[in-house]
Image (cartoon, helix red, strand yellow):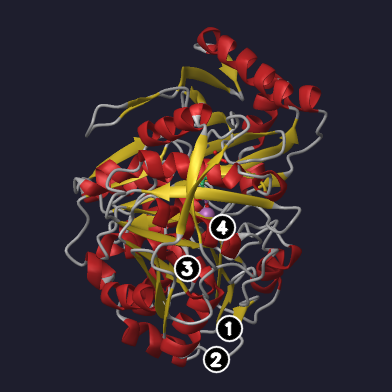
Amino acid sequence: MSISEPLQPIRKKIRLDSPFTDQKPGTSGLRKSTKQFSEPNYLESFIEAILRTLPGVNQGVLVIGGDGRYGNKQAIDVILRMAAAHGLRHAITTTGGILSTPAASNLIRYRKAIGGIILSASHNPGGENGDFGVKVNGANGGPAPESFTEQVYSCTKILEDYAIVDSSSISLDLPGQYSIGSMTIEVLDGIEDYISLMERLFDFDLIRSALKKGFPIVFDAMHAVTGGYATRLFEDCLGAPKGTVLNGLPLEDFGGGHPDPNLTYAKELADLLLNTDSYCFGAACDGDGDRNMILGQGCFVNPSDSLAILTANAKIVPAYSKGLVGVARSMPTSSAVDIVAKDLKIDCFETPTGWKFFGNLLDSDRITLCGEESFGTGSNHVREKDGLWAVLFWLQILAQKQCTVADLMSQHWSKYGRHYYSRHDYEDIPIDVAHDLYGRLELMLPKLVGQEFAGQTVKTTDNFSYVDPIDGSIASNQGLRIILDDGSRVVVRLSGTGTKGATLRIYLERYEHSNGNLRQHSQKALEPLIIGIDALAEITQRTGLERPTVIT
Ligand code: VG1
Ligand code: CO
């Protein structure tokens, strides 16, 4: 079907009353409340800044899609009309406007687009009272680097007007070809290409036969973007029974839930795996499909351990059968993968929090796999973390080894030792309280060296900064680290993705050798560190919170 708009759609310049000074992108794009995004000209002025900054806009190809949250389709309509006004040649979007972040990364790469605009606030709640977000990815398919987002931000501060074309909305109901003026638009099924990519990476036959032999799995799409992808993957392609995918229908408000796959927000799934014997394997993804949580029967896999397990077993997956060139993890992620990398004699890089920092390492073939403690794992197949990819990776390993998740974890720890690990989040605390706490702790850091902390001696302290080994760019103030004599550590960071108040993140880690006690509860094993940092940073006292809002 093809609908042609009038040949000369009206291009207008809308004058802005005042520039928008609060459009500073955080860890991953611009994330604000839906209400703020609904203010007149708010979205438009940010998109204008992007289209003025992104290289290749004139006659370029742009990918646009989102996680289906409230405002997704309206935003696509605005972006298409602004893209036409800025001289793009072709825009690619998807049916229902549904496109997961990793699938967008794939589309950008293989359609040789100049980049993509992804409408998502990821794991933040959606709906009229929730959050909305805009992420920009570059031609490599990955999140734009800080140099780009800084430029966009500077542009928003001086913006006086934006250009848009007047035309009626195009339908996203079915695949089709359209045009607005001289810009052509392709609406395609956002799922097909992603599934074919997965088929090229994994051995679907092996997974299919393992599932058939009686390995019941369950997947929670949390009413977010992965519903359609997961149903097609697990139920249609891999033969899992109907009903394997829970909450598979994407909803504008994610069914009122918080689409963050962790033990707090994916409790329904966690209960099925931890408190019943109905399933051998369970997994969930977040709002935009880039995060994953892995569970076995009676067993939660810590994301830092997950990265280590994937690294140790990568050769099982056809795409990585020749081995890995290197791996990377974000700084707060535990060192579980470092030990595996050492054993495999491959490089292991430590980057700041945020997927954009893996981009250069992936582009220059220095790493094959990478991951973050925040339920993100990925590889060089795209330039984003990829939730369903991680689930398939786990299924491939389990199908090949014919063992349970718990067995695989035990085997791993008895070979490499165990990194007890936990993240404590204090959400929605007053911004000044958070900054005072952080600033005070930072000032204390130099004096802590050589002092006793949590029953050990403090070896080093710093505020992590990173020099990109490829382009030499520097990212500083990436988190406070207190590293103890036995290798244990506490990291303190302020989140860059929240929209209400500030979120303080405390990352706790302690290593236990393979011949030590590997069966403790992690909160118990980390207790001295938990008590130590609370006393030192005066967390309870200053925030008034007796305990963290979320413990992972
Ligand atoms: C959080 C995570 C970080 C992740 C980021 C984006 O950032 O800690 O690891 O890369 O979210 O994930 P912060 O600044 O709040 O700690 V997503 O699923 O929003 O792309
Ligand atoms: Co996400």
Image depth: mark 1 or mark 4 in front: 4
Read off the residue under disc 1: 244
Residue labelled with disc 3? 407
Identify the residue shown where x is 47% and y is 83%: 232
Within-10-Å neighbours for mark 3: few <14, some 14–19, many 20+: some
**Disc on the earlier residue, 1 or 4:** 4
Separation of disc 4 and disc 3 at Cα? 46 Å
**Distance of mark 2 from mark 1, alpha carbons?**
6 Å
Q: What residue type is labelled 4?
A: Ala
Task: Using the image as rendered, state which of residue 362 and residue 274 is in the foreground.
Answer: 362
Mark 4 — residue? 75
The reply to whether discs 2 and 1 touch (Cβ–Cβ < 8 Å) is yes
Task: Give residue 469's quadrant in the image.
Answer: top left
Per the image, the residue denoted by label 2 is 241
Classify residue 384 by image quadrant: bottom left
> Gap in Å between the C-alphas at discs 4 and 2?
36 Å
Local SS, label 1:
loop
Mark closer to the chain start, 4 or 3: 4
Q: What residue type is labelled 3?
A: Asp
| Left or right of 527 on screen, residue 167 | left
Residue at mark 2 to residue at mark 3: CA–CA distance: 25 Å
Q: Which of marks 2 and 3 is in front?
A: 2
| Amino acid at the residue labelled 2 | Pro
The quarter of the rendered structure image containing the N terminus is: bottom left
Q: Is 324 or 357 nearer to us in this picture? A: 357
- Compared to 444, does 74 lie above or below? below
Say what secondary structure mark 3 lies in: helix
